[in-house]
């Protein structure tokens, strides 16, 4: 036999989820018949269940799912594009730097350590340039103050 309001609250949820047996439903009706706080809470729970049930239908119409998948595809596509652009810039700047590096490597006036240092410096500058450029473009796209006018 159910006696406490705490047990009735659990029973309310079972009832709203359509999991309560006939005996439990009858016990709930009897308790709600004489307990005003539980009646108020049961009414609130029914209202919440109704509202959230209607929200699901309104939030996710078929067109919303189509829009979601389109945006997901666009994000994936753009992410891959940024990776390819970054790699392309690195390759082109690297290729353009080959002449400079070739000149440095062919000179006999520098030691091997100096030549390696210059090579690493040039490669590091290329990677840093691409990284900063990409970061600035990404920040510009997500800047919350971008559309603010003075």
Image: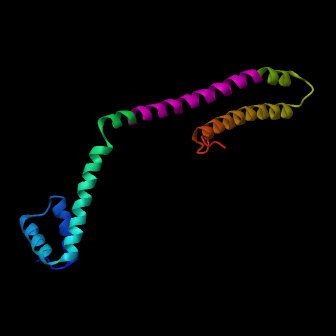
Q: Residue at x 74, y 35 (%)?
A: 124
Please provide percent x and percent y for residue 64. 35, 37
Nearer-the-camera pick, 111 or 85 = 85
Please provide percent x and percent y for residue 92. Answer: 69, 22
| Quadrant where the C terminus is found in the figure | top right
The mark total stands at 0
Q: Is residue 26 left or right of residue 52?
A: left
Above or below 1: residue 72: above
Q: Which residues are magenta?
A: 68-97
Image check: 120 left or right of 130? right
Q: Is residue 39 magenta?
A: no
Q: In the picture shown, does residue 33 fall above or below 79?
A: below
- Name which residue lies at 7% across and 68% down: 23
Residue 143, compared with residue 12, is above or below; it is: above
- The residue sitting at 10% across, 67% down in the picture is 25
Q: Would you say the magenta stretch is mainly helix, strand or loop?
A: helix
Tell me: 100 left or right of 52.
Answer: right
Q: Depth check: 147 or 115 in front?
A: 147
């Amino acid at each position: 036999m159910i006696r406490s309001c705490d047990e009735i609250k659990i029973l309310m949820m079972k009832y709203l989820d359509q999991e309560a047996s006939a005996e439990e439903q009858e016990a709930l009706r009897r308790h709600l018949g004489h307990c005003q706080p539980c009646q108020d809470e049961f009414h609130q729970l029914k209202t919440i269940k109704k509202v959230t049930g209607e929200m699901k239908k309104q939030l996710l119409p078929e067109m919303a799912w189509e829009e979601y998948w389109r945006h997901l595809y666009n994000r994936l596509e753009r992410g891959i594009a940024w990776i390819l652009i970054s790699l392309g810039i690195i390759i082109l700047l690297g290729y353009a730097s080959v002449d400079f590096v070739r000149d440095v490597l062919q000179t006999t006036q520098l030691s091997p350590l100096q030549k390696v240092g210059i090579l690493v410096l040039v490669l590091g500058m290329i990677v840093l340039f691409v990284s900063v450029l990409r970061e600035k473009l990404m920040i510009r796209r997500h800047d919350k103050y971008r559309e603010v006018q003075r």
